Image (cartoon, coloured by chain):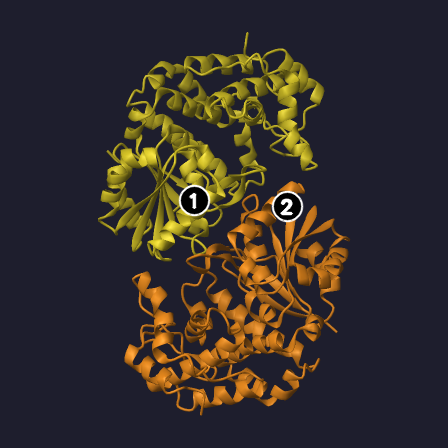
Chain colours: A yellow, B orange
Amino acid sequence: VRDRCVRVTAGDARASYDVVIAPGALARLGELAAATARASRYAVIADATVASLYGNTACEALARVGPAEQFTFRQGEPSKTRETWARLSDAMLERGLGRDACVVALGGGVTGDLAGFVAATYMRGLPWIQVPTSLLAMIDASIGGKTGVDVPAGKNLVGAFLQPRAVAVDTDLLATLPPDEFRNGLAEAVKHGAICDASYFAWIEENAAGILGGDAALLPELVQRSIEIKAGVVSADPHEHGQRASLNFGHTVAHAIERATAFGIPHGQAVAVGMVAEAAIGEAAGITKAGTAARLTHALRALGLPAHIPPHLDAETLLSAASGDKKARGSRLRWALISQIGQAARSEGGEWTVEISEQTVHSVLQSGPGSA
Amino acid sequence: VRDRCVRVTAGDARASYDVVIAPGALARLGELAAATARASRYAVIADATVASLYGNTACEALARVGPAEQFTFRQGEPSKTRETWARLSDAMLERGLGRDACVVALGGGVTGDLAGFVAATYMRGLPWIQVPTSLLAMIDASIGGKTGVDVPAGKNLVGAFLQPRAVAVDTDLLATLPPDEFRNGLAEAVKHGAICDASYFAWIEENAAGILGGDAALLPELVQRSIEIKAGVVSADPHEHGQRASLNFGHTVAHAIERATAFGIPHGQAVAVGMVAEAAIGEAAGITKAGTAARLTHALRALGLPAHIPPHLDAETLLSAASGDKKARGSRLRWALISQIGQAARSEGGEWTVEISEQTVHSVLQSGPGSA
């Protein structure tokens, strides 16, 4: 069986790289490193939980190319700070890693962001390889070269763009993911179909039960198709000046929910609910085909995901959470919507986001989209 | 009179930019910003001393394009830390600057490194403009896109490469520089001639008295020729994989002197002494034409710069300061030498640095090069 492989072309040719998708890819990490990022030493950055599960396998696989050492931090988003970044960098300096080293980010989205920012800034930049271990990281966070940390003013406000040399996606790792975390990743897969590919969306609808059950024949296909979509968007717009905004479908409401609940609702669930709400907003504004919110609701529920906004979050609360941050920067809220399943909406001027009257948004959020 | 202008081509065309050299360039900063980095707001980063001298002029000049605000820090290398970088970033976030802002680095080398690193990492990267105010920053630090901060393990170990959109060199500012600081900058000009351009070196020798006296006809010429040399080297090797190492001529000994004196000797003086010592090492190793160290000594003294290693720094002290750091990283000391005035030395394999036996280095340092 040949490995599944997706090419990401980010900006110029030198920044292009392959995403290799294969069961057992972790144990073959050495091959990939030898081919794409030969280095005198490898710094494997992982949170303590992932390190205990996969750290040794990664280091043993890399050892055939060069010595590999682990650098760990405490699991979770609260670790994604400048302080953890500084501590990891200093630990690598103390161990004497030089400009000929390579960083390996082993873990979920937090690890990729943090390890990528270490790589982007260590001695003005080291090459790095991503090894995503969660479904969300595999199909979303590990594609696109965004790195960074959270600061008091907000999430991801300090960071850098740095494309990795390669991404190794080991679909075997999905079997050990907690079911909640697995479902959270599926929300982004639904989004990929919704913004770009109607036939992929239909395939997810048809195979929802098998996907949710972790069918080993379906998951690599899902991972590959989602990565192809994300890679296509990133390749067209590596620095987020245009099309990349379409990936924010569902995320304006999702971020409002996360902020209003102090991140008490997992990202995937917030995105699921957010897509339904934004489809309803689009329908009310005459941008989105009627019935789209209902179809999204059906698909998300079949994947074990919620589709309606928790009742205690009223329209005022969400609107102020959504627009507060923007208003502080003197700019207005813009929405990345879809015109129908499989197609991102574009303005007459060709923009990937639109403004929607606050009244329309308010009345849709008030009516409880997705609860029907 | 047309402005002097040097083009830096760093990597790909999008990263190319102009260095504009002109008396009064600071007051015309708005024009340059409008042409190269139009933004909704400008963040002028400067140390408190430079801000009090030139901050208002810069902001007024920029105001014709967009509102400009000052962000300041305490003068000096001890400020070049992750903490100052974080404080500046947070202050900009608090004032609500977004992705459509532009950073202006107004000051010497410390400011360029620090403000550049803020620009490289603020919301994953803002455009920036450099306005160097010291001779050293004009002809060296502001060309090449190196940004970064010092950390406990050493100087400049955390940072990024980010080419600015433009560099504005106002040669009028040289008139207000303290004489010591002006002479320190001249050491790098001598280095540029020594590694790249024999006729420029000879021009400096002939005009040493006028240059040292601040002759307004000579300084723009000196600044331009040095920038052309630095820009040529950086354009050939933007990420320091080869030729850029030639800029380190004199710097191996200079860094050893700085470390051994806990940075008690200014960088320019250390580089002056370092060039003479490294020319002598090259002569002893049969790499550098005989008489080169003597010619460098003569030129440096004519510019009011020292040429001999302070007597209290013996060979053992310097060697261990020079190699300690390298040994910790498992690598060996390599030297960027010249074959004669005007020409960097290259190894038979084409490399820009060579290894020299510790015995040769020791005996040269022992003999007190430059003191003759």
Left or right: residue A186 compared with residue B51:
left
Residues indicated by labels 2 and 1 sit on the same polypeptide chain: no
* Crowding near the residue tagged with mark 2, few <14, some 14–19, many ≥20 C-alpha atoms within 10 Å: some
Q: Quadrant of the N terminus of chain A?
A: top left
Q: Chain of mark 1?
A: A
Instruction: Kindly identify the residue that appears in the image at 41 percent across and 43 percent down.
Output: A115
* Residue B93 x %, y %: 62, 42
Vertical comparison of B118 with A137: above or below: below
Q: Quadrant of the C terminus of chain A?
A: top right
Q: Amino acid at mark 2?
A: Met
Vertical comparison of B16 with A91: above or below: below
Left or right: residue B175 compared with residue A292:
right
Which is closer to the viewer, label 2 or label 1?
A: 2
Q: Amino acid at mark 1?
A: Gly
Residue to which mark 1 is pinned? A116
Vertical comparison of B364 with A329: above or below: below
Q: In the drawing, what numbered circle is on residue B92?
A: 2
Q: Chain of mark 2?
A: B
Q: Nearer the viewer, residue B322 or A231?
A: B322
Provide the secondary structure element on which disc 1 rests.
Answer: helix
Instruction: Kindly identify the residue that appears in the image at 49 percent across and 54 percent down.
Output: B160
Q: Nearer the viewer, residue B57 or A227?
A: B57
